Image (tube, rainbow, N blue to C red):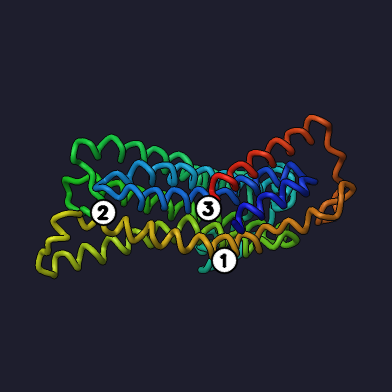
C-alpha cells in the first residue's frame, strides 16, 4: 500500500507534469514487480512462471528508459547538457571506469554513447524475453541449465553483457553530470533504480548457480524429480522479490519524494516556475486518480 499511496500523492500534487510523469512510471515498478512475483508463486507449475517473468522483464526496460528520460528532463534536454559539459576535461577515475578516457574532453559523442549504452538494454531485455518464450516450448530453454545445448547459457551471457554496458553508461552519464544533477539528489535515485533492476538480476543468477551446485552435489530426492533446479531457484527469486519490494518502496519513497512538488502551482520544489494546468490536464489527473483508487480496491 505504501507505493500506491506514494503514487497517489504525486498525482495529488501534479505541479510539474514534465518530471512527475516519469517518476510515476518509475514508481509503478514496485506494484508490478510484487504482483508479478506473487502470480509466479501462485501458478508455480514447471516453467509457467516464465510467462509472468516476461512482463517483469519488459517493465524493467521501460523503467530504465523513464529514468534516463527523467535525468534529461531535470537538465533541460541533450542540448542544455552538452552546452554545460562540452570541453570539460574528463577526470580519470577507476571507480567510474574513465581511466581509458584520461586527457579527453566531453563531446556530444560521449554523451550519446552513454544514452545508447543505456537504451540498448531497453531493446535487448524484451528481445531476450521473447526468445525465451519461443525456446521454452521446444525444450531448448530451462532456468539454471548451463549446458551448451540450452538457450539459457547464451541468453544469460547476452543479459550480462547488456546489463554491464547499461550500468556503465548510467555511471558514466552520472560522472559527467553529477554537478548539474546535485540539486536533485541523484545518488540515492541512481542507487535505488540500479539496485532494484540490476542487483535483482544478479541475485537470481546467483541463486540458480547455488541451487544447481547443490543439486549436483547431493543425492537426488523425490522433490528434485518434480521440479528442476531452475524452477526451484525461480521460486526463491520470486519469493525474495515479494519481500524486497517492501524495502524498495521505502527507498523509492525517499528517492522520489512528493514533498518537493507541494509548494503550489507557482514554483516547484527546485524554485522553477510552473504554469497552471489546463482543464483537460486536470481531468486527466482526476482520471488517473480514479484508476489508482480502483486498483487499490481490487488489491484489498
One can see residue 112 in this view = no
- Please tell me which residue lies in front, 225 or 201: 225
Q: Nearer the viewer, mark 1 or mark 3?
A: 3
Disc 2 or 1, which lies upstream in sequence?
A: 1
Q: Using the image, determine if residue 133 lies above or below residue 203.
A: above
The residue indicated by pointer 2 is 231
Q: Is residue 9 left or right of residue 112?
A: right
Residue 169, labelled with which disc? 3
The residues bearing labels 1 and 3 have C-alpha atoms spaced at a distance of 16 Å
Disc 1 or 3, which lies upstream in sequence?
A: 1
The residue indicated by pointer 1 is 92
> What residue is at 66 percent from the left and 50 percent from the top?
7
Disc 2 or 3, which lies upstream in sequence?
A: 3
> What residue is at 18 percent from the left and 40 percent from the top?
139
| Residue 233, image quadrant | bottom left
Q: Residue furthest left?
A: 219
Amino acid at each position: 500500500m505504501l507505493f500506491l499511496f506514494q503514487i497517489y500523492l504525486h498525482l495529488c500534487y501534479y505541479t510539474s507534469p514534465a518530471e512527475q510523469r516519469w517518476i510515476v512510471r518509475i514508481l509503478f515498478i514496485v506494484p508490478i514487480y510484487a504482483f508479478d512475483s506473487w502470480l509466479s508463486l501462485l501458478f508455480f507449475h514447471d516453467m509457467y512462471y516464465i510467462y509472468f517473468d516476461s512482463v517483469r522483464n519488459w517493465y524493467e526496460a521501460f523503467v530504465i528508459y523513464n529514468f534516463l528520460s527523467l535525468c534529461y528532463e531535470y537538465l533541460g534536454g541533450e542540448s542544455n547538457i552538452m552546452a554545460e559539459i562540452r570541453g570539460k576535461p574528463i577526470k580519470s577515475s577507476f571507480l567510474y571506469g574513465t581511466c581509458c578516457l584520461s586527457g579527453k574532453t566531453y563531446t556530444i559523442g560521449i554523451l550519446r554513447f552513454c544514452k545508447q549504452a543505456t537504451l540498448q538494454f531497453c531493446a535487448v531485455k524484451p528481445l531476450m524475453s521473447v526468445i525465451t518464450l519461443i525456446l521454452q516450448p521446444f525444450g531448448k530453454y530451462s532456468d539454471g541449465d548451463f549446458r551448451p545445448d540450452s538457450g539459457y547459457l547464451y541468453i544469460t551471457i547476452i543479459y550480462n553483457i547488456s546489463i554491464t554496458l547499461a550500468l556503465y553508461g548510467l555511471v558514466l552519464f552520472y560522472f559527467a553530470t553529477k554537478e548539474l544533477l546535485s540539486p536533485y539528489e541523484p545518488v540515492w535515485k541512481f542507487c535505488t533504480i540500479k539496485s532494484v533492476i540490476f542487483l535483482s538480476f544478479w541475485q537470481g543468477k546467483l541463486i540458480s548457480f547455488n541451487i544447481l551446485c547443490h543439486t549436483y552435489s547431493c543425492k537426488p530426492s523425490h522433490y528434485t524429480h518434480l521440479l528442476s533446479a531452475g524452477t526451484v531457484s525461480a521460486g526463491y527469486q520470486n519469493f525474495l522479490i515479494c519481500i524486497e519490494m517492501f524495502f524498495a518502496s521505502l527507498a523509492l519513497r525517499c528517492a522520489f519524494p512528493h514533498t518537493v512538488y507541494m509548494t503550489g502551482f507557482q514554483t516547484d520544489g527546485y524554485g522553477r516556475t510552473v504554469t497552471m494546468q489546463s482543464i483537460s490536464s486536470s481531468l486527466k489527473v482526476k482520471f488517473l486518480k480514479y484508476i489508482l483508487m480502483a486498483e487499490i480496491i481490487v488489491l484489498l
